[in-house]
């Protein structure tokens, strides 16, 4: 039987984005201590599963390519996410990461790949490996590239952000149009629950 899935971006969707006060910038976590789950993420993931979806992480992680963290730190961060989800009695069915960056400092990862969002490569790979029907699946993310990757793959999409959205202009420029906008993952799970009922 074919599966359906909710694909989730990781940073800013499952765990918090980190604010580096000294540099005044927001960035993805670079070590396990910086991994903190956003509210009600476990609850949202379990709702997706109760609705019959597989839940799969689809994430660009160029930190190794940019020499921001090591592969060991990357593995430990993945473990931390799993451990924190377990505390909320939740887990994911798969994790797919793009470690590449076209301008990377680390030569091993400095490539123009087919998996870095907005390209749909990771979603397509997950769909192939886990027998997923993309037209009955969703991509949820907080970035324009998540919406683009989801749309190109043929999924419905939800942008996490404010309703008066700061990304709207960029979305328009990029021709990316999320099916819905939700303030957080739990609210997104309620939208999908509602849509499934129709
Ligand atoms: Zn890649």
Image (cartoon, grey):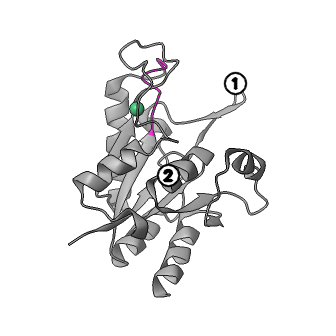
User: In the rendered image, is residue 183 in sight?
Assistant: yes
Q: Which residue is mark 2?
A: 152
Choose top left, top right, bottom left or bottom right for residue 188. Answer: bottom right
Q: Under tag 1, what secondary structure? A: loop
Relative side of 81 to 157, left or right: left
Q: Nearer the viewer, mark 2 or mark 1?
A: 2
Q: Nearer the viewer, residue 118 or 107?
A: 118
**Residue 65 inside the magenta-drawn segment:** yes
Q: Quadrant of the N terminus?
A: bottom left
Q: Main secondary structure of the magenta part?
A: loop
Residue for point 31% across, 51% down: 126
Residue 159 placement (x, y as % from top left) = 61, 58
Residue 18 placement (x, y as % from top left) = 59, 38
Residue for point 54% across, 63% down: 185
**What residue range appears in magenta?**
60-67
Q: Measured along the vertical axis of the image, is residue 93 above or below residue 113?
A: below
Q: Which residue is mark 1?
A: 22
Q: Measured along the vertical axis of the image, is residue 170 above or below residue 139?
A: above
Q: Nearer the viewer, residue 139 or 185?
A: 139
Choose top left, top right, bottom left or bottom right for residue 27. Answer: top right
Q: Nearer the viewer, residue 163 or 14?
A: 163
């Amino acid at each position: 039987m074919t599966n359906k899935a909710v694909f989730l971006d990781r940073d800013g969707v499952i765990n918090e984005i980190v604010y580096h006060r000294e540099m005044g910038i927001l960035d993805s976590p670079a070590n396990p201590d910086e991994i903190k789950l956003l509210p009600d993420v476990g609850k949202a993931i379990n709702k997706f599963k109760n609705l019959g979806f597989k839940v799969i992480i689809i994430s660009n992680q160029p930190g190794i390519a940019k020499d921001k963290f090591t592969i060991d730190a990357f593995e430990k961060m993945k473990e931390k996410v799993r451990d924190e989800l377990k505390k909320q009695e939740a887990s994911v069915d798969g994790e797919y990461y793009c470690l590449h960056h076209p301008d990377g400092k680390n030569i091993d990862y400095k490539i123009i790949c087919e998996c870095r969002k907005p390209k749909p490569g990771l979603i397509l790979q997950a769909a192939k490996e886990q027998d997923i029907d993309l037209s009955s699946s969703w991509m949820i993310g907080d970035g324009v590239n998540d919406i683009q990757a989801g749309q190109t793959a043929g999924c419905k999409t939800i942008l996490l952000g404010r309703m008066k959205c700061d990304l709207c202009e960029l979305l328009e420029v990029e021709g990316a149009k999320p099916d819905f906008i939700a303030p957080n993952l739990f609210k997104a799970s309620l939208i999908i629950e509602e849509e499934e009922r129709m």
